[in-house]
Image: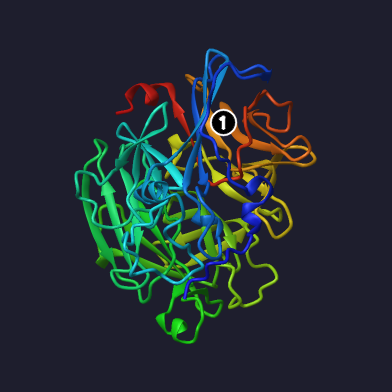
Amino acid sequence: MTSTTPTLSPFLTNNFAPVKEEITADNLKVIGELPADLSGMFVRNGPNPQFSSIGQYHWFDGDGMLHGLRINNGKASYRNRYVRTHKFQIENQEGKAVWAGLLEPPQQDNPHGTDTNRANTALVYHAGHFLALWEGGAPYDLKLPDLTTIGKHTFNKKLQSSFTAHPKVDAVTGEMMFISYSMPQPPYLQYGIISASGELLRTIPIDLPVGVMMHDFAITENYTIFFDLPMNFRPERVEKGQFPIAFESETPSRFGIIPRHGDNSEVRWFETPACYIYHTLNAYEEGDEVVLVACRMSATNVFVTNEGDGDPNGDIPYLYHWRFNLKTGEVKEEKLDEVPSEFPRVNDELVGRKTRYGYSARVVSGDLPLFDGLIKYDLDTGKSDTYEFGKGRYGGEAVFAPRLNASSEDDGWLVTFVYDENTQTSELVVVNAQDISGETVARVILPQRVPYGFHASWISEMQLINNR
């Protein structure tokens, strides 16, 4: 039975706490100088609950809220807007929470139905559409630069499954690949391809032995890589009074590689020791090998249950790479750094192709997901450089904003939100991607606090013009 007494979660306090107002502000104060050839919009998604939760609150439960920073001609403006999902609108009308969250039992008899899509996780721009994503449902279409919600985007009603929070756009072909997982019943995994014009071409089922939580995947020029990692759904756990999803450290991890336009019969599986991956940096092909670079954890307990295996190093992400030899079937796994980091990104124009540089957020030791700096990796030399936010200052995922007419892979800036606990204020930070340990290029002081959140996108001036 669902509890009606909320337990105060750490994700409802300090800078994890939601903000209540949607505001618009122009001509923001800039410390330093915004580059003349940095023109576009930085948008970040994250959980921001409208109302007090029913029962226990999990960070993933909050309603999606977008925080956008428009940069043009050296000036900046800010706006934040809720994604007006079906869930948001029903609860807004009722004036209270109607659905419980992830840590409470399912409400199959809820009179308002079971559509609890929060659209709170990530963002993608494709074929003129800017989409807010949540892996348990369909994307929501948004208008730029207003950040108003247009509605669910189902690709002309061809989308019959949920849609990953981390689709992959191939900038060369224009195609967008996605996955959809279902834990209680098969097909446990589906794989889809959307054309450069935005047409959903096909969705095919992929055989898995059991339902898994597959948060991310990867693409190369010719292949797609699935992560069958042992965060498994077992209905028998419910009968024992346990949470149905748990990490199984005794179960190996499997990586499935399929030709981009292949089918289930063409998947090749490679096995490694148990691990979990929330986020991929990139993947590419090199000779007979498919190379994957991602943040690896030895275990995870994302649902904050008591059924974890007690791995003291679990939930600590480190950058790794894997080499899958398509000729011999051999797989090599190697740790690339001893410094924990997450939210890895590359120049989006090179997703699926070999990149020299990668960027991630440096993890602060402790129980909460805090990040105190950015790391730039040179994957050719193995060296790295770090940008530190400063004492009592924490940020999140940084995205790469390329310079107009960029001359190299890293010719541009890293952009992210930073919260200063000393002054309890938020700002946008712009860092030179070619010299991240150097001086901050610009700081845009924001008119209100921006809570810690999830994933972000950089929208170019051309994309803003072409937004439908």
For the residue pair 31 and 255, the one nearer the viewer reads as: 31
* Residue 78 point in image, percent of width and height: 54, 26
Return the residue at label 1: 410
Picture quadrant where residue 296 is located = bottom right
At x 66%, y 73%, the residue is 311
At x 55%, y 40%, the residue is 20
Q: Quadrant of the C terminus?
A: top left
Near mark 1 (Cα within 10 A), the count class, few <14, some 14-19 or many ≥20, is many
Mark 1 lies on a secondary structure that is loop
For the residue pair 218 and 155, the one nearer the viewer reads as: 155
Tally of marks: 1
Picture quadrant where residue 130 is located = top left
* Residue 117 point in image, percent of width and height: 38, 53
The kind of residue on which mark 1 rests is Asp
Relative to residue 314, is residue 220 depicted above or below? above
For the residue pair 363 and 119, the one nearer the viewer reads as: 119
Q: In the displayed structure, does residue 66 sit left or right of residue 195?
A: right
* Residue 133 point in image, percent of width and height: 40, 47
At x 70%, y 71%, the residue is 312
Q: How is the image coloured?
A: rainbow
Relative to residue 227, is residue 260 depicted above or below? above
